[in-house]
Image (spheres, grey):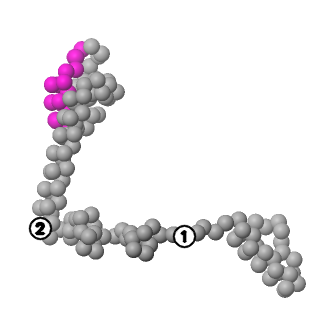
Amino acid sequence: MRRRGDRKLTVESVTEALKWSGGLVTAASRKLGCHTTTLYSFMNENPALKAVREEISEALVDLAENTLYRAIREGDLKAVMFFLDRRGRHRGYGWKAEVTGRDGAPVQFELEDARAVLQERLDTIAGRFKRAGEKPDETRH
């Protein structure tokens, strides 16, 4: 790491470092020879760098989509399943099931009072002991 003040950050140098690091701030800060918090502060002071990071992020998404597309074309079953789970739901594919009420309305349900249900079950158990002529062990929990 360079000492403070050895190298002044510029929008151009930070842009270059962010592109070099694929938008990873820690790697960019190492390349620039500054602390990560210094780089974050500089980026917050220079709104143009936000657009640079978004552009890099979008380029990485494009790369990932191209890689996924190639994997699907090559018959990679995991890639096919991933794609259908995310983008084929309208055709019935996917692991996640969404449940709705009648005519797409929200599902309506009632929650029981857990304490009342627990007390009712405890009373039932105590009743069984009484009928059997035994006394329930009240020290056990």
Q: Residue at x 81, y 77 (%)?
A: 126
Q: What residue type is labelled 2?
A: Glu
Decide whether residue 72 is among the magenta residues. Answer: no
Q: Write down the quadrant of residue 124 in the picture.
A: bottom right
Mark 1 or mark 2: which comes first in sequence? 2
What is the C-alpha distance between the residues marked 1 and 2? Answer: 46 Å
Q: What residue type is labelled 1?
A: Phe
Question: What kind of secondary structure does the magenta stretch mostly adopt?
Answer: helix
Residue at numbered disc 1: 109
Rendering coords of residue 60 (x, y %): 18, 47
Reply above or below: 56 against 128. above
Rendering coords of residue 55 (x, y %): 18, 40
Rendering coords of residue 39 (x, y %): 29, 26
Which residue of the protein is positioned furthest toward the top in this rendering?
5
Query: Dot 2: few (<14), some (14–19), or many (≥20) neighbours within 10 Å?
Result: few
Residue at numbered disc 2: 74
Q: Residue at x 71, y 65 (%)?
A: 115
Q: Which residue is drawn at 27% across and 34% down?
A: 25
